[in-house]
Image: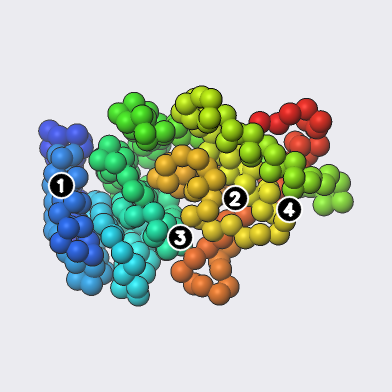
Amino acid sequence: MNLYTSEPSGGLISNDAPVLIAGDSDLALHRAASTVEASGARIGATLRLDAALERFRLQARASVLWVELERDGGAVMDDLLEQISCDVAERKCTAVVAAPRDLVDLVFAKAAGAGVELVVDGSETDRLAALAIAMSGADRVGALGDMASDQSAERLRQLSDEVSRIASTLARLSTEPQGLKSTSTAVNDTEVPAVAADVVRSVIRARRLRDRFFDSDLFADPAWDMLLDLLQAEIVQLRVPVSSLCIAAAVPATTALRWLKTMTDKGIFVRRADPHDGRRVFVELSRNASSAMRRYFAEVSPAAVV
């Protein structure tokens, strides 16, 4: 069965491919359905998590899968998210996973691949933007290598972040990361300068101190804030879970996760499985990113780094 079509809907979403919704409660299903309906997209089915897993396994192809979570669903939730990740990786669909902040580590560990939009405690604007991005990606299902679609999806990511920022001053969204330099050049560990943890901590404190005097929207820079946090953790030999890194980014969790995924895709961050908890991952700097950060601090010292 193939539910993918390309007829226009006339709503905010530009095609009429159905959205399959899975939720862990009636309230969750209702909330997801309201978002999809508000976008103008068509709902293919609404299912509870246990029924959705079997449906997704049997589905030959769909457009977008929306999973709405309110609580930790245990093995059923894990299996569903893993199935979705596989389907997205195989270009069967795209997906949106909406969840509360206390599930961010679990959701990121199971469904953080490209093609899965994560919305954490998101506003309705955030949710509509995530669906728009997913629907844009659905245009490429079954059509690999469509560069025009890739460019449109990237532009939509930028626009959706801007719309979210303007629509709500509390959203504090920033634009999609652009122009991050490659850190692929090989380095010699013996040449990497040492950096004191106190120096990095003082920079982090100074950055947060600005919020006392200026609107934090003026200085939103989640990529740099996460780099600083991971460098500090590396120096003092601490592991950083996804939830902690999202807090360090000083932007809404949905935005932080998008940056985190981008930085990981670019090889700047590295995911490490928690050896004691299969439902959690840690994040750390790649070897080359660590070297770049340490060299940066050595170059600018003793000038102030903020």
**Residue visible at 62% across and 60% down in the picture:** 239
Mark 4 vs mark 2, CA separation in Å: 15 Å
- Lower position in the chain sequence, tag 3 or tag 4: 3
Amino acid type for the residue under numbered disc 2: Phe
Residues at marks 1 and 3 touching, judged by CB atoms closer than 8 Å: no
Q: Residues within 10 Å of mark 3 (few under 14, many from 20)?
A: some
Question: Which residue matches tag 1?
Answer: 34
Residue 295 in the image, given as x and y percentages of width and height: 78, 39
Residue 203 in the image, given as x and y percentages of width and height: 68, 37
**Residue visible at 71% across and 42% down in the picture:** 200
Q: Under tag 3, what secondary structure?
A: helix
Mark 4 vs mark 1, CA separation in Å: 46 Å
Say if residue 163 shows up in the picture. Answer: no
Residue 244 as seen in the image, left or right of residue 141:
right
Residue 186 in the image, given as x and y percentages of width and height: 76, 47
Mark 2 vs mark 3, CA separation in Å: 16 Å
Question: Which residue matches tag 4?
Answer: 235
Q: Under tag 2, what secondary structure?
A: strand
Q: Under tag 1, what secondary structure?
A: helix
- Lower position in the chain sequence, tag 1 or tag 2: 1
Amino acid type for the residue under numbered disc 1: Ser
